[in-house]
């Protein structure tokens, strides 16, 4: 027993407190500070064991990214993945286990799921839960939230705690610092027991200590917001990537932002993007809205073009010139694939 606790333990604890909490260390604290029992206990737990033993399942891009910070904060990190990452793990100071049974026998306090959204169910079904401690905290970091919440509630033993989270950043956006970046979490099932509450708080504290903006919200709320922001961002990034944008010597700031967006989103796997689409009920609606918005803009442009053409057709060439368009410019635009409802007349030369 540490000297501080030894000195605190001399007066006998009140019998009522002895009944409430059995471990000797706790009784010692009770005896010393009987009027502030709960606060003492919590701060004691924090002081006695500030670090966690965390097992990461899925040691790909994002799992490794998280592990670096966990290790830097002094936590003990174990990892398992479908592929063999033993050498990269040892460089990061992480113990890699090729067999999930061996990893679970290490009795991590926290198991963190960082697999692709698409493979989550498969991975969950392969975990030998019986080898874990009866009380283990399961955390997921998937970019959608209702889907893993439902799977965790379905597959995990009832005694396990569940914390659904989404760090709203990745290896690119969080490369230099996590300060100011959002961390969303939902305490889906955390037991009332003091040690369980404390374990969950300690895990959340990893992100709070890095300066993340801690946002507690339900999984459903997360998915609604994320479809309108994250899925849209990834979609636009991927569309722009298809255009093959290149930097020019005269980039405007906005264009630089687009190039950054392509850079940020193109490094994520297609599995991740597909998961955002497939497992967020709101994603399809966002895709349709984007499509409609694009068509609206196209129509606004072609509508104007159409008006100019009409002016030319019906002899108001003066009006068309006021708009800065010559007949040949209009013809060129139309032949370059202007939207269909700006079709030129059969004989454009009759137009003026
Ligand atoms: P990902 O493509 O979404 O997931 C890759 C991980 O999934 C790897 O660990 C991979 O294992 C594993 N995996 C894929 N298919 C598997 C299968 N059939 N069986 C077992 N494992 C399989 O890329 P990621 O960026 O690493 O993302 C991991 C999780 O973090 C995802 O759920 C994602 O939504 C979430 N997330 C990512 C970011 C980000 O910026 N990247 C940010 C927040 C949250 P192996 O490598 O061993 O094959």
Image: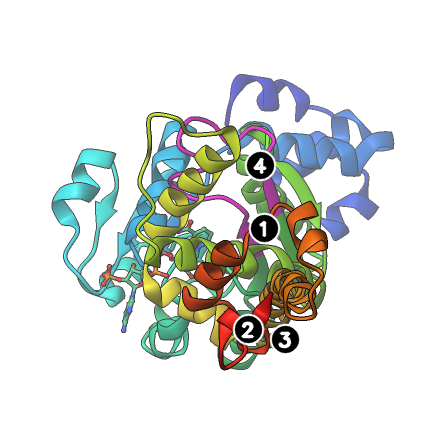
Quick one: label 4, few (<14), some, or many (20+) residues within 10 Å?
some
Q: Residue at x 61, y 55 (%)?
A: 229
Q: Which residue is mark 1?
A: 325
Q: Are marks 1 and 2 in contact (CB under 8 Å)?
A: no
Quick one: label 1, few (<14), some, or many (20+) residues within 10 Å?
some
Among the two numbered marks 4 and 1 on one chain, the one whose residue lies closer to the N terminus = 4
Q: Which residue is mark 2?
A: 350
Q: Residue at x 57, y 46 (%)?
A: 199
Among the two numbered marks 1 and 2 on one chain, the one whose residue lies closer to the N terminus = 1
Displayed quadrant of residue 123 = bottom left
Q: Nearer the viewer, residue 129 or 22?
A: 129
Mark identifier at residue 181 = 4
SS for dot 3? helix
Cα distance between the residues tagged 2 and 3:
45 Å
Position of 241 relative to 154 (above/below): above
SS for dot 1? loop
Cα distance between the residues tagged 4 and 1:
48 Å
Counting from the top left corner in percent of width and height, residue 320 is at 66, 54
Displayed quadrant of residue 70 = top left
């Amino acid at each position: 027993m540490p000297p501080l606790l030894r000195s605190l333990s001399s007066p006998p604890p009140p019998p009522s407190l002895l009944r409430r909490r059995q471990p000797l260390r706790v009784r010692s604290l009770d005896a010393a500070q009987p009027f502030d029992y709960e606060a003492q206990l919590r701060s004691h737990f924090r002081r006695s064991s500030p670090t966690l033993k965390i097992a990461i399942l899925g040691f790909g891009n994002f799992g490794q990214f998280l592990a670096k910070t966990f290790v830097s904060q002094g936590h003990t990190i174990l990892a398992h993945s479908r592929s063999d990452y033993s050498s990269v793990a040892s460089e990061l100071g992480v113990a890699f286990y090729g067999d999930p049974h061996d990893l679970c026998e290490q009795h991590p306090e926290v198991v963190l799921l960082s697999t692709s959204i698409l493979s989550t169910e498969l991975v969950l079904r392969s975990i030998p839960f019986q080898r874990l401690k009866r009380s283990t905290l399961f955390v997921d970091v998937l970019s959608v939230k209702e889907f893993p919440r439902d799977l965790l509630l379905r597959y995990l033993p009832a005694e396990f705690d569940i914390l659904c989270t989404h760090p709203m950043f990745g290896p690119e956006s969080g490369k230099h610092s996590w300060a100011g970046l959002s961390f969303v979490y939902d305490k889906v099932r955390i037991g009332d027991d003091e040690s369980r509450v404390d374990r969950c708080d300690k895990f959340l504290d990893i992100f709070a200590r890095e300066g993340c903006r801690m946002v507690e919200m339900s999984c459903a709320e997360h998915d609604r917001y994320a479809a309108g922001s994250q899925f849209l961002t990834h979609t636009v990034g991927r569309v722009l990537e298809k255009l093959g944008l290149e930097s020019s010597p005269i980039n405007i700031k906005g264009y630089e932002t687009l190039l950054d967006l392509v850079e940020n989103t193109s490094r994520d796997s297609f599995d991740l993007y597909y998961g955002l689409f497939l497992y967020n009920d709101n994603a399809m609606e966002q895709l349709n809205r984007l499509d409609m918005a694009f068509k609206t803009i196209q129509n606004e442009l072609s509508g104007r073009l159409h008006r100019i053409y009409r002016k030319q057709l019906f002899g108001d060439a003066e009006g068309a010139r006021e708009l800065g368009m010559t007949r040949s410019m209009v013809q060129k635009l139309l032949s370059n694939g202007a939207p269909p409802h700006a079709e030129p007349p059969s004989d454009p030369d009759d137009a003026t």
